[in-house]
Amino acid sequence: MNEKVTSIKIAGLGGMGVLTSTQILADLFFRQGRDVKKAEVHGMSQRGGSICSDVRFGKKVFSPMVPAGEIDFLVLFQDDQLPLYEAECSPQTVILKPDQIDLEKLGNKRALNIAMLGLLSRYLDVSSEAWLEVIHEVLPEKLHQVNDAAFELGRSGV
Amino acid sequence: MGNEAVALGALHAGAARGIGYPGTPSSEILDVYNQLGGKAEWAPNEKVAAEVALGVSFAGVRAFTTMKHVGLNVAADVLFTAAYSGVDGALVFVVADDPGLASSQDEQDSRRYAVAAGVPLFEPSDSQEAYDYTRLAFEVSERWKIPVLLKLTTRVCHSGTIVMPRAPDTGLAAAHFVRNIPYRVMVPGHARPAHRRLRQKLAEIAEWNETDGPNQEIEGSRDLGILVSGVAYQHAREAASDASFFKVGMSYPLPMRKMLNFIESVKRAVVIEENDPVMADAVRAAGGTIESAPEMYRFGELNVSRVKRILAGDVTPEAVPPRGKPPQLCAGCPHGITFDLLKKYNCIVAGDIGCYTLAALPPLSSMDTQICMGASLGTGLGLRHVLPREEAKRVVSVIGDSTFVHSGLTGLAEMTYNVPPTGHVLLILDNTTTAMTGQQEHPGTGRLLDHSPANQLDYEKIARAMNVPNVGTFDPIRQPAEFEAALVEALAKDELTVLIVRRPCILAVARKGVKPATTEG
Ligand SMILES: Cc1ncc(C[n+]2csc(CCOP(=O)(O)OP(=O)(O)O)c2C)c(N)n1
Ligand code: SF4
């Protein structure tokens, strides 16, 4: 129980792929042999409301929800969502926003979520292959090419 | 997530059938159960679902029914007397509470139902326990021939933690009928002994819970002992990692002797539970002394920070989290047109529950009441009966298609039976799906849970069969002028009118990639 738990919060609007990204992260860390918990918000069918979800991994995780002040990575799919979560951040929180990616190069806007995971991947000690393997399992085959490129854009900036 | 774990648990327990009505956060269970190969169906409402499940269990096999907490209000009539009759195979009520109201109209605590009806209740705290307790719930139900509640909460349903499944149950009985009139026909002469049998079963189950129940004691510092159940356990372990814990897995009947021993074994004992002070009250009634959360923590769900505050006795006001962008009707949602019209004619709108309830929020602000499923009819009629004529004539009841099938049919019978002097107008917003909870099928869509074809209700014929004189169907997008004219005419008449406003939900069409069964009036 000594290993520190890593806590990631993903936030965006309904329809932007928050749940898919959560699934990818949870599967990824499960494969890395970690205890993983995720907490999602479901139920509002309509598009466009603010939503967020939490993923936590480590040797042993208790609460599925990230406690206030303990967010290690806040991944925003839209810049203007920051004020909602700022109070839960600490000086150590790494905040990732779409403006850190060259959006001009993003072929398909709907792949933004995967590009943001690519950006997050720079901070985590997991190989590109392991990431892409999980991404391929979660997303339908016809989207693989677009999302591979999006992931690479986030991870290396090109 | 927890809902998937429940579905897998039910499959491995050999359930013959799962029957439910959608409701956040329970909705995914039956879809997953179906995908895993289980036999799953949507019923028109939770009461019918529970009755079908009870019938399955009367055939000597295992059944379960899924619903959200308020669904149990609808199914409560079944639960209370099924507790008397008992079951033959097994019957598990999977009920998902929503502390914090992520997506509900109230935050009632289903543990109260276990006490009131006298049925055992299990409370998992993560996905593994959701799986394990589902299986245990079937075993306890079958062993004592009693319905069992499995209480989930939003954070158990929609959180995902790693699950290790066990080998499926084998050698279960095949469905068969054995006549047993004194046990299954609940007339007073049969129900009196049935009540005694129920109390006897509960006494035995309480003993079992003391010795073999899924309760867990975690040794830690004796300075602080925490009595806890459900997902609050996970928050509490993190908030007070050094404390001792007594985690209750079966919250009714409680393992009270063990709980009292635990409380006495520590210097300071605190109970941490979400929603109502159910365990706190029970401990005190049994003569125990325990600290519990101040009243302010009864509202909303718990988390690590709130548990820390409770343990510190902190009653200073909590920071109010900033509000995000509220959900809105999707751009192009067919409901929008209807509410624009109701606003234009300054209608008093007795509303109901579904996506269209969003019309109550600005900028539309054109829904005046919303209480529970089906209430649009009764409340609208009540207003029509007593309001002055000029106001009464502006009252319109508005209900979604799934909600109409769920509990609008009896309201329509009331409308045609006790007719207000000014008549009444009912709009059935038929978007050919249960949109709010994720586009599930229902008896009006013409498709089963797995989207295969089925019989389809005909709302026009239903209204005519109930002797409503004015009935019409309009597509609000293709026939806006005709729809508006029909509404104006209905508001002017002192007669009963039912208008079916039919246009598929755009998300349902996008998701299925096929046209829903009905697209034209
Ligand atoms: C007793 C009860 N069961 C379930 C729910 C959850 N729920 C809320 S609205 C709704 C159905 C909405 O479908 P519909 O009436 O067709 O409206 P739509 O969302 O499609 O516009 C459901 C299942 C509830 N609030 N109460
Ligand atoms: S999900 Fe369907 S019914 Fe609900 S707001 Fe969107 S379009 Fe309208």
Image (cartoon, coloured by chain):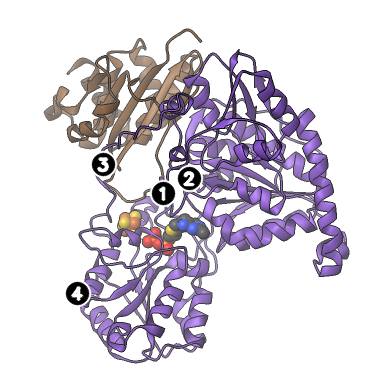
Quadrant of res A77: top left
Screen quadrant of the C terminus of chain B: bottom left
Q: Does the CB distance between marks 2 and 1 fall below 8 Å?
A: yes
Q: Residues within 10 Å of mark 1 (few under 14, many from 20)?
A: some
The residue that disc 1 covers is B103
Separation of residues labelled 4 and 1 (CA atoms): 29 Å
Q: Does the CB distance between marks 4 and 2 fall below 8 Å?
A: no
Separation of residues labelled 3 and 2 (CA atoms): 20 Å
Q: Is residue A153 above or below residue B510?
A: above
Q: Residues within 10 Å of mark 4 (few under 14, many from 20)?
A: few
The residue that disc 3 covers is B324
Upstream in sequence: badge 3 or badge 2 = 2
Judge: label 4 CB < 8 Å from ligand 2.
no
Q: Are marks 3 and 4 on the same chain?
A: yes
The residue that disc 2 covers is B98
Judge: label 3 CB < 8 Å from ligand 2.
no
The residue that disc 4 covers is B344
Upstream in sequence: badge 3 or badge 4 = 3
Q: Amino acid at mark 3?
A: Gly
